[in-house]
Image: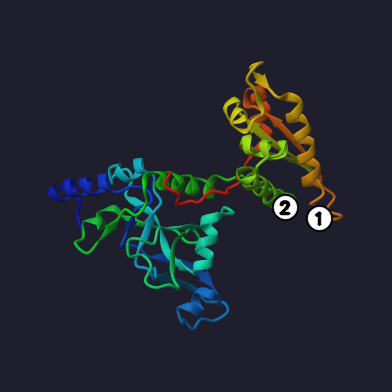
Amino acid sequence: MSATGIGRGKLEQLLRTLRQGDLISLGAVTLVGAGRSAATAAAHADVGDDTLWSVTVDSEAGWYVVLSQDCDIVRDPDAEPCIVVCPLVYVPQSRWLQLRSGPYSPRHFPFPDDQGLRPDDARWPAASLLYISSVDKTALLHDSVRQLSPLTGPQRARFGRWVARRFGRSAHDDLVERDVLAAAGTRIRSLSKSFGTADSPTDVMRLVSATQEWYVEATDRNVQLHAVLTEASANTAGLWDNKKGTWHTQRIEAATKQLRDDLAKRLPAGSGYALNVHATSLDRVPASQYVAAWAVWTLEGEDPLADE
């Protein structure tokens, strides 16, 4: 279908109403491979060990999640002809609830179940970045194509950050991820949760709560976690001295050492890693060190569908 004349004007109008995180009823995922695999088995395809194959898979839910950024969606099809999408899939309720309460998943993002997206109590909707594909923008002009906008503003913003992390997250060494970051992340999330419920939170809880961003600096068998605080976050957590207008330096240093000892004892025996924790603010970090050595460490504990 040509996007000229009246069609082009209608297409421009449609694209202005479409946002990242919206759902469209058009799409498919094409997989290319060789030999027998889970994909050929699911498609009931009889292939040999050396057969090259191409399989097109439709979403069971019938919906595809828009991954393209808003600026690329509205761009003229001559410059940006396609919209990138991924399928909306169904997961068990236990998995859906896990996705809502953390830890962060780079592969699945839960979608609300209040717009007819859940056909029964056994199937719950989630975007899946295991497979992505492209849809030609002119296909949106077809009368059969439907569109839904199930995400609120805050949810949409969180979804956008999730998509960006999938393709832009730092590639930590597999062993560092397994032996250091997995255990440390679990403990830090636990401390953060405890801060919100404790009658008398410890300074370690306060330190974790005050941390706005975490960074990892790993060299060989040495791993350093950088906890980045701000004056506002330290004040909220009770680590800012309002009378003196400065940090509670001694308390922060003591809490940092306690956190380091707490995390270090959780490393697997014989892993050979040395772990340290450093609390700072970004204005104290040289740009050369920040750019060259620090990698963002994403620690998710929030509900992706929280409307705030």
Kind of element beneath mark 1 = loop
Q: Name the residue located 53 percent from the left edge and 58 percent from the top edge.
A: 99
Which quarter of the image is occupied by the N terminus? bottom left
Query: Which residue in the rendered view is the most extreme toward the left?
Result: 6
- Numbered tag placed on residue 53 in the rendering: none
Along the line of sight, the residue nearer the viewer: 196 or 290: 196
Along the line of sight, the residue nearer the viewer: 172 or 242: 242
- What is the x, y in percent for residue 290? 65, 30
* Residue highlighted by disc 2: 183
Q: Name the residue located 19 percent from the left edge and 62 percent from the top edge.
A: 143
Question: Which of the marked residues, 2 or 1, is nearer the chain's N terminus?
Answer: 2
- Left or right: 221 in relation to 230: right
Q: Name the residue located 17 percent from the left edge and 45 percent from the top edge.
A: 9
Q: Is the residue 2 above or below the residue 37 in the image?
A: above
Along the line of sight, the residue nearer the viewer: 304 or 197: 197
- What is the x, y in percent for residue 35? 55, 76
Q: Is the residue 244 above or below the residue 79 in the image?
A: above
What amino acid does circle 2 point to?
A: Ala
| Cβ atoms under marks 2 and 1 closer than 8 Å | yes
Q: Is the residue 123 above or below the residue 224 in the image?
A: below
- What is the x, y in percent for residue 151? 37, 51
- Left or right: 107 in relation to 219: left
Q: Name the residue located 38 percent from the left edge and 51 percent from the top edge.
A: 21
Which quarter of the image is occupied by the C terminus? top left
- Crowding at dot 1, Cα within 10 Å, few <14 / some 14-19 / many 20+, comes out as few
* Residue highlighted by disc 1: 268
- Crowding at dot 2, Cα within 10 Å, few <14 / some 14-19 / many 20+, comes out as some
Q: Marks 2 and 1, how far apart in space?
A: 9 Å
